[in-house]
């Protein structure tokens, strides 16, 4: 299917969900230059609206409120939801019911492009001695990874059935700098995060594309060749931090599943009572 609505380089109104979260706070000021109006949403405190912003707190599991949230929106950057491994009932409401509500609202309101914050934890049970791409079968490492795999399937369905384009970003570890040796492979700088999201918003035709969110790290477990059509070109690398990271973590326990699998500590989180 070819999109009849090529994505513009600038939008009238963008929606950023999860705007009060860690990455939402990073992207909120950066996305404003890409639109006339930035609508921001979260259930946490959003502060005061900056010029050109609209504050609209909404719970993702509230279907009617989600439809109102997407009214008049050209494109969505969806970071909202639970972002850590949690009991399934918490994941279910925000990440599964909430994702369905988002896509149904997009269909009803005529939104044509969604940037979906998926996660590397969709494939967390691949080993760290493997290099995979987005065509590899999913191997979620927990409830959180399962919910993101559902979100990717939802995105594919809404593209196939309704022509809503999505770029699913399997985000690695986006922090000011890598914290440990695993993050030497998974690190995504804030500047590269912005480049990735802007590429996902403005690439002329994406259908449903999946791309791993990582910087140009020397160590890498993920091959983004299949997503080159997005035009994402990372400029940063974890390499300048390597010496400091390895000094802090000179030894690793090779019997620890967190050092064997790409998902790190997520592979051994839970079960929850």
Image: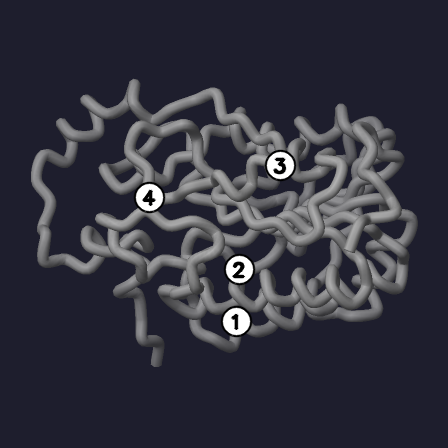
Asked whether the beta carbons under mark 3 and mark 2 sit within 8 Å of each other, the answer is no
Q: Earlier in the sequence, mark 4 or mark 2?
A: 2
Q: For mark 4, what is the residue?
A: 221
Quarter in which the N terminus is drawn: bottom right
Residue pictured at 44% horizontal, 36% vertical: 214
- Total tally of numbered discs in the picture: 4
- Label 3 environment density (alpha carbons within 10 Å; few <14, some 14–19, many ≥20): some
Give the SS element for disc 3: helix
Please tell me which of labels 1 and 3 falls first in the chain: 1
- Answer with mark 4 or mark 3, whichever residue precedes in sequence: 4
Q: Where is residue 246 shown, x and y percent of the image?
A: 16, 30
At numbered mark 2, what does the secondary structure look like: helix, strand or loop? loop
* Alpha carbons under labels 4 and 3: distance apart: 20 Å
Circle 1 is placed at which residue position?
Answer: 90
Separation (CA) of disc 1 from disc 3: 35 Å
Does residue 44 show up?
Answer: no
Give how far apart the Cα atoms at labels 2 and 1 are: 8 Å
| Lower position in the chain sequence, tag 2 or tag 1 | 2
Real-space Cα separation, disc 3 to disc 2, in angstroms = 30 Å
In the displayed structure, would residue 122 be above or below residue 244?
below
> Where residue 219 appears, x then y in whole percent?
29, 33
Which mark sits nearer the N-terminus, 4 or 1? 1
Q: Are marks 2 and 1 in contact (CB under 8 Å)?
A: yes
Q: Which residue is mark 2?
A: 82
Left or right placement of residue 113 versus residue 273 in this view: right
Q: Image quarter for residue 67?
A: bottom right
- Tell me if residue 257 comes above or below residue 89 in the rendering: above
Question: Dividing the picture into quarters, in which one does residue 188 lie?
Answer: top left
Q: Which mark is residue 126?
A: none
The residue beneath circle 3 is: 229
């Amino acid at each position: 299917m070819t999109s009849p609505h090529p994505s513009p380089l600038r939008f009238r109104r963008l929606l950023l969900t999860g705007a009060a979260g860690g990455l939402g706070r990073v992207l909120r000021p950066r996305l404003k230059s890409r639109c006339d109006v930035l609508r921001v949403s979260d259930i946490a405190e959003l502060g005061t609206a900056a010029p050109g912003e609209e504050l609209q707190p909404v719970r993702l599991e509230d279907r009617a409120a989600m439809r109102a949230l997407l009214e008049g929106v050209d494109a969505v950057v969806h970071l909202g939801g639970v972002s850590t491994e949690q009991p399934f009932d918490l994941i279910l409401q925000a990440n599964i019911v909430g994702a369905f509500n988002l896509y149904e609202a997009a269909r009803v309101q005529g939104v044509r492009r969604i940037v979906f914050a998926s996660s590397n934890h969709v494939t967390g049970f691949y080993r760290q001695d493997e290099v995979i791409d987005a065509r590899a079968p999913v191997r979620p490492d927990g409830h959180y990874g399962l919910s993101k795999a559902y979100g990717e399937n939802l995105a594919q369905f809404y593209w196939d059935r309704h022509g809503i384009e999505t770029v699913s970003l399997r985000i690695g570890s986006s922090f000011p700098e890598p914290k440990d040796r695993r993050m030497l492979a998974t690190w995504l700088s804030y500047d590269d995060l912005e480049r990735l999201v802007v590429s996902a918003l403005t690439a002329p035709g994406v259908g449903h594309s999946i791309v791993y969110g990582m910087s140009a790290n020397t160590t890498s477990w993920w091959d983004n060749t299949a997503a080159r059509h997005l035009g994402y070109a990372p400029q940063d690398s974890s390499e300048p931090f390597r010496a400091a990271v390895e000094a802090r973590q000179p030894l690793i326990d090779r019997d620890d599943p967190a050092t064997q699998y790409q998902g790190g500590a997520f592979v051994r989180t839970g079960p929850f009572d």
